[in-house]
Amino acid sequence: MAAPKSLSRTPLSTVTAGTIVSSLLTVQTSGAGFTDLTAEVAKFLREAAAREGAVTLFIRHTSASLTIQENADPSVLKDLTTALNRLAPENAGWVHDTEGPDDMPAHIKTMLTSVSLQIPVLNGEMTLGTWQGIYVAEHRARPHRREIVLQFIGSAAQ
Amino acid sequence: MAAPKSLSRTPLSTVTAGTIVSSLLTVQTSGAGFTDLTAEVAKFLREAAAREGAVTLFIRHTSASLTIQENADPSVLKDLTTALNRLAPENAGWVHDTEGPDDMPAHIKTMLTSVSLQIPVLNGEMTLGTWQGIYVAEHRARPHRREIVLQFIGSAAQ
Amino acid sequence: MAAPKSLSRTPLSTVTAGTIVSSLLTVQTSGAGFTDLTAEVAKFLREAAAREGAVTLFIRHTSASLTIQENADPSVLKDLTTALNRLAPENAGWVHDTEGPDDMPAHIKTMLTSVSLQIPVLNGEMTLGTWQGIYVAEHRARPHRREIVLQFIGSAAQ
């Protein structure tokens, strides 16, 4: 542990929390791997006329999950898949195997990543870093239809 | 990485964010394993007259955590326990061992899962998928008393 | 899985959700390890005159992350670093290695921990447990400048 070496903070921005906007996003995945949702979430915020607040993503599944990761070099996403396969291998003596060898590893991978994400929104835009993309991670081998709830809480332009 | 193969979204639902309702839930665990909190969170939302918004769960501990997982086959939860034991084994040369061999692995398991969860609420009900249950995961060997803050932000019926 | 053995809940506290306060925190890390942000988040809440609601932390990076962990014995944080190094080792055949051997492991460690945290606030204070501290975890070997968005949603004193 270390005390912060150097630390600064911007002045506070304050608005009235007025609006909640919700929508259900359905994504068809193409089997194990990552699908970029960043542009779709940005589009949702534009339609919601979002100004300042936070957007929540919630995935309604236990064998696919959400993560925010590097969006520049696709080999990062390959290595993330490799890492998850090493942490939750198939045929590793799992009791739950009636749905195929990829099913129990998919639940473990979901537990190790995220079912919900919150991203602050300022001036109508997510405060993502330059290299951050929002991904749904499909952990089953075959393509699946996945549902993700999008919800903005905050101030809207109208 | 893949661009979404197919993607659709429902029309926006918009309400006024009016209310914050908070409550502290105390759970007695029965040692390492998972305890289902889904019905208790649903009950909290009914008492809060919640309509549309999001419910947050926050666990006030560092050796127990929260996760959303498969609620149908209990062997999934057994395998999740096995997986966590493999990822954070006892007697693996940890420096911090004054509180027993299960203590440091419990901190690691907490880091790999979640201390906070957000679940959108629509029409008074959590938008959980069919197979999703909300669990507190006890990572210590012995039973513990665990505190979880429940908080709804959104619109309420009154 | 187990049904709750014993479970209790406090009466509901209800307030009006009126205010969103946001600020950007910049932290200079001193290389791989944990930096305590708890006091700085508490200071932000005091300046925001926060009463009841939730504070969100969001880190704008993919090779550093957030976690809530034990704040008493510094050896816990050492062991957490060891655990992450074992789960995401360097020189393990990663494809993405142009930014150095610590880069891809840093992305994996970020995926296994958190980019966003939500902590309920009651009576102006975070509902952290006695042993909980909020940390930014630097996963790169060298010091970095890291940006974290702080956002309070809830009721404020004025």
Image (spheres, coloured by chain):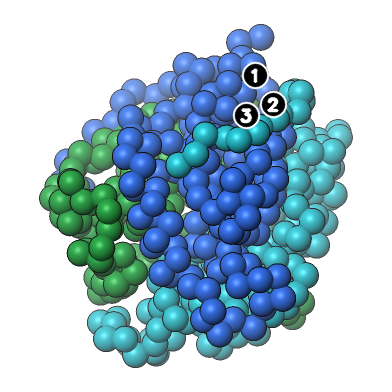
Chain colours: A blue, B cyan, C green
Q: Can you give x and y, in whole percent of width and height, for residue C15 in the image?
A: 69, 36
Label pair 3/2, CB-CB below 8 angstroms: yes
User: Dots 1 and 3: beta carbons under 8 Å?
Assistant: yes
On what subunit does the disc labeled 2 rest? A
Q: CA distance from mark 3 to mark 2?
A: 5 Å
Q: Amino acid at mark 1?
A: Ala
Q: Residue at x 48, y 73 (%)?
A: A89
Using the image, determine if residue C64 lies above or below residue A158. below
Q: Residue under circle 1?
A: A48
Q: Earlier in the sequence, mark 2 or mark 1?
A: 2
* Neighbour tally class for label 3: few under 14, some 14-19, many 20 plus, Cα within 10 Å: many
SS at mark 1 in the image: loop
- Rendering coords of residue A141 (x, y %): 58, 59
- The chain to which mark 3 is attached is A
| Residue topped by disc 3 | A152
Q: Could you tell me residue C83's position as x and y percent?
A: 31, 72
Of A73 and B123, nearer the camera is A73
Q: Earlier in the sequence, mark 1 or mark 3?
A: 1
Residue positioned 72% across, 34% down in the render: A24
Task: Confirm or deny contact between disc 2 and disc 1 (CB under 8 A).
Answer: yes
- Label 2 amino acid? Val
Residue C39 visible in rendering: no
Drawn side of residue C103 relative to residue B32, left or right: left
Check disc 3 and report its element: helix, strand or loop.
Answer: strand
Locate the C terminus of chain C and report the quarter of the image it occupies: top right
Horizontal and vertical percent for residue C100? 15, 51
Q: Does residue A145 appear in the picture of this structure? A: yes
| Cα distance between the residues tagged 1 and 3 | 8 Å
